[in-house]
Image: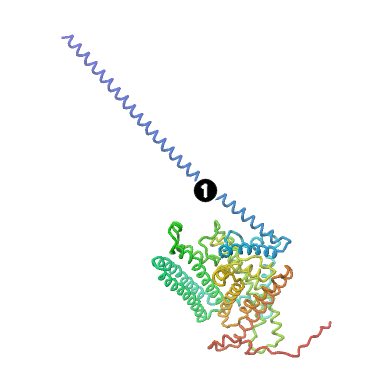
Amino acid sequence: MSELKNSADDSSSRSSSNEDISAESNGIERRAQREFKEEIVKDMAIDKMREKMDTIVQKLEKDVARKLDLLVDDLVGEVKLFNLKNYELRQLFRDSSSASLQRSADDSNSRRSDRKRRTDGKLPDKVFMARNSLLTDLFEVKHIKTIYHIFLVILIIMFLNTVVHDFVDRGSINLGLRPIVAGFGKFHTTLALWGCMQLSVLCVYPCFFLWAHVRKIFKTNQYRKIWDLCSIFGVALFQCSFVTLVIKTVLHLDFPPASSVAVLMEMTRFVMKVHAFVRSNIPRALASSGKTSTEDKPPHAVIVPSFGKFLYFLFAPTLVYRDEYPRTKRIRWSVVFRHMLEVVGVIFYISFIFERFLTPLFDRFGGAEISSGKFVLALFGSIMPASLSFLCGFYCLLHAWFNASSELLRFADRMFYRDWWNASSFAEYIRSWNVVVHDWLYTYIYKDSVEHVFKNCNALATVLVFTASAVFHEVILAFAFRFFYPVMFVQFEFMGLLLMFLTRNLSKDAGNILLWFMLCIGNGIQMSLYNIEYYARRNCPVSGESLVDYMIPVSWTCHGISHNPNWTFSAVEY
């Protein structure tokens, strides 16, 4: 029995030891599995960290590459702009004639355009590029900057002269603001009318979009021609109605002269913008719905540009339409503020000129008979103030205002004028004085006339350009001052064409002197005649009920100019 008991105890001890061994082995196995799982989790975490690090590194590489590309593009652009600016400055300050350089460039361009015209019958198009205005670069020269400072000092002296003169003479202080107050009256109504003009012009885009897409629906050319003719008639009707309604509103609300000029200039700008947009996008719409096969058409061809591009064009300081323009990287608000301050300063400058030099010469015309001697003195007395007003108007509109709007819109091509002051011929002056309007006249009148209407007859196209420009200017002045006195029309249409032939073959010095002489005399005559008629109608008002009252100059009929046949000339003895 004792042996059986001992054997049972041995078996139980062996079984317990086996259980301990199995439990320990199970624990070891579980620990191994747990350690294995932990290693797997660690490996997965390391893999995820590697993937994250790879993603971060790739993103950093892309960001660094993109920033490096932008820096390189900026550097290349600055270098190109620096080279272009230095080249233009070198051309301006070279001893050789800038007119001859321009003439040689024009000759080479004309030869290239003639070769191109012989191949495809088309003239070259306007090319936009990033560049500064000429005066912006010239003001970096300290000598030119000093001249700018001199004009600022003259403005301050003219202000002090006006204040001191009126205080001593009349006992009251006159700040020279009466021309501004009288000219820019009803300013809030002017802004409201401009807003209505803007909204009406915005309606052009959906109408053009409708025409372009409806045209694709028609399968036959006959229906397309009818639709096209109706659309052309609609555009012409819109332009005529727009001009008529704006002019009638200006006359009905009786805007002052300066406000009238601003509204009518905006009216002209809108008309030119609408024509440029429609004319530039018609070929695209015709090509998209023409008979060309789908293989010849580019994929995803855009029939009509987006509304954003149309809206940007309406505010951009250019009259030639493009889908894209060169843009600057950012807006320099200091530049915007400086140019807007210059606009305000130039307006005050012109107001002082009128207050001190022009108004005293003409405010009595029409109230009593004026002798021919006083008329001649007034005519020659207005030459220098008129020339100074001409220069101030150029700087205010074509430099300060356009550069401020360009900076706000990040518009990079700021060649709004060339060095017209160095011109030796009237043709060169016309091309250089107002590049914005000249580009529109060249692109949509001269170029279209030469290519489609007159068939390479440049003389008739030139006459048409001068006629269109003269009509636009005369419409603005006639309805702004409420009388038809075609001094501007005669100067543009007849004297302009005559000067083009007279100054064509002159030397640099003789041509430049003659050009400046004619500019000063022409501005003086124009300023004096318009002022005489304006004040004559104020001092001797007419009924204004018939068209004849607007056509016949009052300064000729009501207390006109008396001729003194007994003029004598004698030397003054000292």
- Quadrant in which residue 177 is drawn: bottom right
User: What residue sits 59% from the left and 54% below the top?
Assistant: 77
Q: Residue furthest front?
A: 118
Q: Is residue 26 above or below residue 288?
A: above
Q: Quadrant of the N terminus?
A: top left
Q: Position of residue 453 (x, y in %)?
A: 55, 72
- Quadrant in which residue 7 is drawn: top left
Q: Position of residue 44 (x, y in %)?
A: 39, 35
**322 or 213: nearer the eye?**
213
Q: Secondary structure at mark 1?
A: helix
Q: How many numbered dots are placed on residues in this image?
A: 1
Q: Position of residue 316 (x, y in %)?
A: 53, 65
Q: Position of residue 482 (x, y in %)?
A: 56, 82
**222 or 434: nearer the eye?**
222
**What color scheme is it?**
rainbow
**300 or 298: nearer the eye?**
298
Local crowd size for mark 1, using a 10 Å CA cut-off: few (<14), some (14–19), many (≥20): few
**187 or 137: nearer the eye?**
137
Q: Quadrant of the C terminus?
A: bottom right
Name the side, left or right, on which 140 lies relative to 249. right
Q: Which residue is mark 1?
A: 66
Amino acid identity at mark 1: Arg
User: What residue sits 50% from the left and 80% below the top?
Assistant: 248
